[in-house]
Image: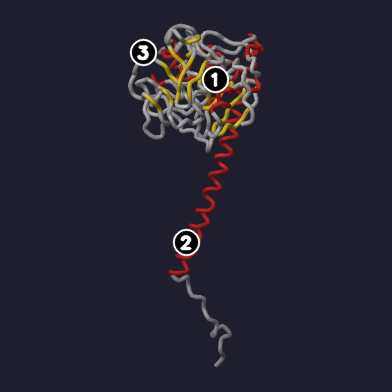
Amino acid sequence: MAISPHAHRLSRPAFTLIELLVVIAIIAILIGLLLPAVQKVREAAARIKCQNNLKQVALAMHNYHDSVNKLPDGGIDHLSGNWQVTILPYVEQMALFQLYSGYGVSQSVISSANITNVTGKQIPICVCPSDIPALPGGQTYQKCSYHNYAVNFGNTAVSDASSAVMGIQSSYTSANGSFTYGGSPFRFNNPQSLINITDGTSSTLMLAEVIQGQGVDVRGYTWWGDAGGIETSLLPNDPSGDNVNHSYCTTAAPNPPAQNCGTQTGSPVIRAFAARSRHSQGVNVALCDGSIRFVTNSITISTWQALGTSQGGDIPGNY
């Protein structure tokens, strides 16, 4: 009887349970090693996108300055319109600018028509992709939109006090020390020219990142005069917290820390907002010459203060 040439071939057994578990474990380890690398690549891309957005906003500021020989107002007052309204035509948002009604009129930012047509809209170029978006419609103050870039109001704080210089405190004490106002490129109802920046445009902040507050927190509410700016009396991502002094504030995660949060205390109302971001170890900023930098949280307060002043006679040095 003929014997099949295949009769003595041994068949390959299927994977055993142990082999299968080993393969699954190896795949899990590889995924675990790969995931942080993917996250780093995504964050690097988001940071670059954020820097590009800041560059475009800084260019818009310069184009506005070329038109009227001054930078935009930091704000007419709290809710009457500010720099974010005036640069709309320079960030390809002429339609929104034309729909804004009552610039300079008290409370115009939160008029129902402006919320519907303008201030309830989020401007993509003013949003950092690394942040957690605070979407209008019950999640923000008066259903206005929040953003991630704010102008430089100097090295103290903003205030309604009679001691304030056009809405900016002449002096202020934070956890980082006591400071005297040294001028700023943006002020309330007092637009500045670049030639007023005697410290030099390459040594003075124009814009910095902020975080969009969640749960009706006013941080990131950049249509509002006060939150439309940052102050360098607080370091980038300062752990001591923003001085919000307002009932529209919460420190519940993922919001950053704040002092006096949840109640409106004291008179006059004084507020200080730090530059903040969700990037690792620092924030993106634009200088008044239009250049973009990444500033780490470890910057010294003296250097950060020097960057915050426009007429302080101080030089930031290396950072």
Nearer mark to the viewer, of 1 and 2: 1
Q: Nearer the viewer, residue 75 or 163?
A: 163
Q: Amino acid at mark 3?
A: Ser
Residue, x 58% and y 22% (percent of image)?
306
Tell me residue 292's x, y (percent): 63, 28
Q: Quadrant of residue 296?
A: top right
Q: Amino acid at mark 1?
A: Asn
Single out the residue that lies furthest toward the front. 178
CA neighbours of label 3 inside 10 A, class few (<14), some (14 to 19), many (20+): few
In the figure, 38 relative to 91: above or below?
A: below
Is 44 on the left-hand or right-hand side of 218?
Answer: right
In the figure, 278 relative to 174: above or below?
A: below
Residue, x 55% and y 93% (percent of image)?
1
Is 273 on the left-hand or right-hand side of 43?
Answer: left
Question: Are discs 2 and 3 less than 8 Å apart at CB?
Answer: no
Residue 267 tag number: 3
* The C terminus - image quarter: top right
Q: Nearer the viewer, residue 58 or 308?
A: 308
Q: Judge whether residue 94 can be spotted in this image.
A: no
Residue 25 tag number: 2
Q: Amino acid at mark 2?
A: Ala
CA neighbours of label 1 inside 10 A, class few (<14), some (14 to 19), many (20+): many
Marks 2/3: CA–CA distance: 62 Å
Q: Earlier in the sequence, mark 3 or mark 1?
A: 1
Residue, x 49% and y 8% (percent of image)?
103
Tell me residue 207's x, y (percent): 57, 23
Q: Earlier in the sequence, mark 1 or mark 2?
A: 2
Q: Earlier in the sequence, mark 2 or mark 3?
A: 2
Q: Which residue is mark 1?
A: 152
